[in-house]
Image (cartoon, rainbow, N blue to C red):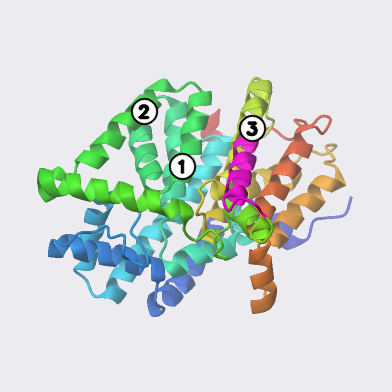
Amino acid sequence: MSERPRFVGALLDPEATRWAWLIIAVYLGALAVAAVLRVQGDFKIYYEAGSRILGGEPVYRLADSNHFLYAPLFAIFFAPLAMLPIKLAQLAWLIVNAVALVAFLAGAIVMLFGREYVVTPAILILPLLACSRLVNNNIEHGQANLPVLALVVWSIIFAEEGRRTRLSGLALAAAILIKPFAILAALFVALERRWGALAWTAVFGVAILAAPVVILGPTRTISETIAYVHVVSSMTGRYQLMLTNQSASSAFERLFSETQADPHLGFYMGLAVEIALIAGICAWYWRDRGLDGGVLAPGRLPLVALFCVMPSLAPVSWKSYYAALLVPNMAMLSVLWIDRKPGFEPPRAVWILFLGSIALNWVMGNEPNRIALFYSTHFASSIVMLIALTLLTHTPDRTSVSEPRMSVSGG
């Protein structure tokens, strides 16, 4: 048997993991420079919401061209940042995103493999590299998706461990109120029958909506909450044909906008596809919930599938949401290569679909990228990844992968 190239050995060497974290730190440092120097359109909206809180102005205005779409408590969260010069505020928000990315990476590993899994550079760097274009988009524009994804994975971890159900509920409630796609995490928690975590999610959801009373007073809190609901509900019919909207409904709207008899037919077709996919994943979970997952914890492949569907769930789903594909990329890399047991040979079609899914998120050049966005290649990449996962499920001896590398303390 030929020896592995040295760099491959380094990728699989747990002793080299510190160097992987150093590479990630350098990567984040480079992004920090780019993020602080540019105008961040999304963060500008958050900054303006914080400024309105400080100035006693209404946060939610239907006449705005770009809306702040999060509950009033989150506008209050941005008020201290709005007291800083915009560039310094962007740097502070960059730090929040950087911490969130590290928490998302670390949480994805724990969620998929358990706390005793021995981390290697490959499991950190390769999934991040595959999704780096989508991660970059989040940080460069100052978006809130990375903090939400970190909250999502840790809410699932805390719910499953059963020791921190309150923390799980708090994280999940915050995530759902920031980005509706986090509702799929609540669905998985329900499938796992973690009712305590769901109960705390409801409690903290109400608390987050009511908490601004302490700062804004009851009258303004009620008016801002009503305005928040109006603004969010107004978004359903907006941005449907915008290229950077990569939701399932937007994909069908663009394809059939010239031919559909009903102006909302594309929207309903996309919604029907999402519902069908989610129903299929739930059935998959119930079928496989008791099976050994090999290197993955039991029930992980259906959970990974939910992360494929997550980015396209809401009617307005920006391409940056697809940073959630880091989870499927991590799971697939583990099963197909990093933790694969000798003798387990995944079908070539799984490899082709997996690599094809990654490639669809890397269309370069202005005109090719515009065409790719029109045909919703980010949405297509998630569907291709889902198909690869499905094929992997039906591969004979698919659980014949190595046992998780356990730490010494794991016993």
User: Marks 1 and 3: CB-CB under 8 Å?
Assistant: no
Point 46% across, 38% down: residue: 183
Residue 185 included in the magenta stretch of the image: no
Looking at the rendered structure, the secondary structure element under dot 1 is helix
Q: Which residue is mark 3?
A: 281
Extreme-front residue of the structure: 261
Magenta range is 260-277
> Would residue 196 be visible to someone looking at this image?
yes
Q: Which residue is mark 2?
A: 165
370 relative position to 82: left or right: right
Extreme-right residue of the structure: 1
Q: In whole angstroms, how far apart are the C-alphas of marks 1 and 3?
A: 16 Å
Q: In whole angstroms, how far apart are the C-alphas of marks 3 and 2?
A: 24 Å
Q: Which residue is mark 1?
A: 182
Q: Nearer the viewer, mark 3 or mark 2?
A: 3
Q: In whole angstroms, how far apart are the C-alphas of marks 2 and 1?
A: 17 Å
Quarter placement of the C terminus: top right
Label whose residue precedes the other's in the sequence (3 or 2): 2
Q: Which mark is residue 168?
A: none
Q: Residues within 10 Å of mark 2 (few under 14, many from 20)?
A: many
